[in-house]
Image (tube, grey):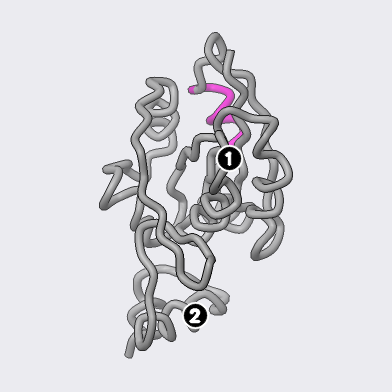
Amino acid sequence: MKKVLFIINSLLQKRSGRDLSQIIQKYLDKSKFDFDIYYSQYPGHAGEIAFSKRDEYDIVVAAGGDGTVNEVGQALAGSAAILGLIPLGSGNGLARTLLKITPSIPKSIQILNACNIRNLDMGLINGKPFFNMAGVGFDAIVAHRYNVKDKHGFFTYLQTVV
């Protein structure tokens, strides 16, 4: 039986208006997996949790947006733990574009149940790992300004770009 750690971005769960722990309980195949759930409380917390727990779990699932995925992925770099995703953010670039994971929470959990594992490339900039994309210049400024906004979503992103 595999051990799974779900790290849920509590802010994005609150925005979604759904209780992910109930959805996980309902859809996760408990004949294959034992699981625990942790909630990140502030920027960087998901990475801290993942790093401190990465040797205790076979799979660490980041439930959040691209920022949460990058935090958790960076923390798992160099470990044997597998990164799983439940996309909750407004962009979900890695989940949508590369991995073809829809923002449906039950479907994301079904993918986990199927143990459909793929290798991902990881890049390094100044020794810091990143997944899916990294930016310098204008796109990095936009990303930084967007991340500090209280409200996220397409229109906030568009406003930030303009």
Which disc is residue 141 wearing?
Answer: none
The spot of residue 156 in percent (x, y) is 41, 77
Dominant secondary structure of the residues highlighted in magenta in the image: helix
* Left or right side of 95 for 18: right
- Label 2 neighbour load within 10 Å: few <14, some 14-19, many 20+: few
Q: Which residue is depicted at the point 62% across and 23% down?
A: 3
Which amino acid is tagged 2? His
The spot of residue 111 in percent (x, y) is 37, 28
The spot of residue 8 in percent (x, y) is 60, 46
Rendered view: 111 above or below 19: above
| Label 2 – label 1 distance at C-alpha | 28 Å
Tell whether position 57 is magenta.
no
Of the pair 79 and 154, the residue shown nearer to us: 79
Q: Looking at the image, is mark 2 or mark 1 earlier in the sequence?
A: 1
Find residue 58 and report its image quarter. top right
Rendered view: 35 above or below 38: above
Tell whether position 21 is magenta.
yes
Which amino acid is tagged 1? Ser
Rendered view: 87 above or below 107: below
Q: Is label 1 in a helix, a strand or a loop?
A: loop
Q: Which residue is depicted at the point 46% across and 70% down?
A: 125
> Residue beneath label 1, please?
79
Which disc is residue 144 wearing?
Answer: 2
Task: Name the quadrant of the N terminus.
Answer: top right
**Residue positioned most to the top:** 31
Q: Which residues are magenta?
A: 19-27
Task: Name the quadrant of the C terminus.
Answer: bottom left
- Answer yes or no: do the residues labelled 2 and 1 have beta carbons within 8 Å? no
Q: Which residue is depicted at the point 43% across and 21% down?
A: 113
Q: Which residue is depicted at the point 44% across and 30% down?
A: 109
Of the pair 76 and 97, the residue shown nearer to us: 76
The spot of residue 141 in percent (x, y) is 43, 86
